[in-house]
Every structure is written in C-alpha cells, then in structure tokens.
Amino acid sequence: MDATLRDRIQSTVDSKKVVLFMKGNKNFPQCGFSAQVVSILKQKGVEFLDVNILADPELRNGLKEFSNWPTFPQLYVGGQLVGGCDIITGMNESGELDKVLG
Amino acid sequence: MIPATEVQALLLAAFPGADIELSDLTGTQDHYQVRIVSDAFEGKPMLQQHRLVYAALGNAMQGPIHALALQTYTPAAFAGLQGDS
C-alpha cells in the first residue's frame, strides 16, 4: 500500500475515538452487518464517525490490508481495530463493549 | 460463489479435528454462516481467532464469499455455552 493511502487511513482512524468503516452511512446502511453495528452504537449513545467505504474503492481495498481484516464493517476505537459485526455483537452481549467504549 | 463442501474443506485443512457447522444462508453459495469449535483458538483473543479463519479461507474471502457470519469457540468456551441452555 502506498504511503499516502496509509497516512490517509491512519489520520481517519485517529480523527475520532470511535470510527466505523461501513457500507453506506449511519442513516442509510447498505448492508445488514453494517446496520447491526450502527444500531448497537446508536443504542449506546456513542458518538462516532461513519465512513462509507462503498464511496471510496481505494480506501476500501487499503483498509483490508491496513486492518488485516477482509470484511466490513470495521470498528475502530482509540485507533485500534475492535472487530467486525460478529465480534461487536458478541462483545455487546457480554458487556465487554461498554468497557472498550468507556 | 464457492460450494459449501469447498469452504468446509478449507476450514478442516486449517483446523484439523475442529467441530465445524456451516450453513449457506441464502442458498446462493456466497453468504455463509459458520461456527467453528477448535483448540487452535485457545489463548487467542477473538480478533485473532477470526483472523485465523479469514486466513484459512484466503482468496475465497476476496470475492467468492460475499458475507460470512462467524462464531469461533475454544472447546472449553463452547462447553460453557451449552451449559447455559
């Protein structure tokens, strides 16, 4: 991955405590997995930046390598990848998500 | 698209002896749900467990599989889960 793209991803990830890379946006998710994570975050009342990867193919491909994670959504908290839909759902049920977001 | 038998074979090759339950969610061979119980996950955080599965599927994740709902458990964690029901 070229350095410019890597820097762009890094600064996006660092721009807010909670960043969700998703298909669609928080008001109009375009995939059930993305919609589910948005709904969990909304339920928590967490403020987050939503980034629509469908609108940016370069970012979409770069993120797979940057995160070492092949699918979307991808949730970052404090600059760290927390996981995709299944992990976030599981962490929400176990209460672990509150600790990460806290 | 990738046949379920192929997905199953890739997973079994990466996680020998694992208990794998695979279902085709849409009948279109590209939306799968899989539950894997394997001691390969022992001592690894969830993120790492899922990465192992994605690595096992390799190129299949780069197009043939559009969506994968994933649950990974160590044998101990899965046994605990059964105890609840």
Image (spheres, coloured by chain):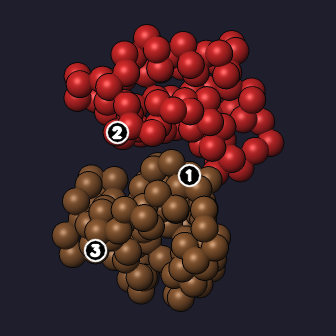
Chain colours: A brown, B red
Numbered circle sitting on residue A26: 3
Q: Residues within 10 Å of mark 1 (few under 14, many from 20)?
A: many
Please state if A93 lies on the left or on the right of A38 as rendered. Answer: right
Q: Secondary structure at mark 3?
A: loop
| The one of B45 and B6 positioned closer to us in this rendering | B6
Numbered circle sitting on residue B66: 2
Please state if A55 lies on the left or on the right of B64 as rendered. Answer: left
Q: Secondary structure at mark 1?
A: loop
Type of amino acid under label 1: Trp
Residue A30 to residue B2: above or below: below
Name the quadrant of the N terminus of chain B. top left
Type of amino acid under label 2: His
Q: x, y percentage for residue A3?
A: 63, 73
The residue tagged 1 is A69
Q: x, y percentage for residue B71?
A: 52, 37
Q: Residue at x 50, y 66 (%)?
A: A75
Circle 3/circle 1 CB separation < 8 Å: no
Q: How many marks?
A: 3
Q: Chain of mark 3?
A: A
| The one of A99 and A18 positioned closer to us in this rendering | A18
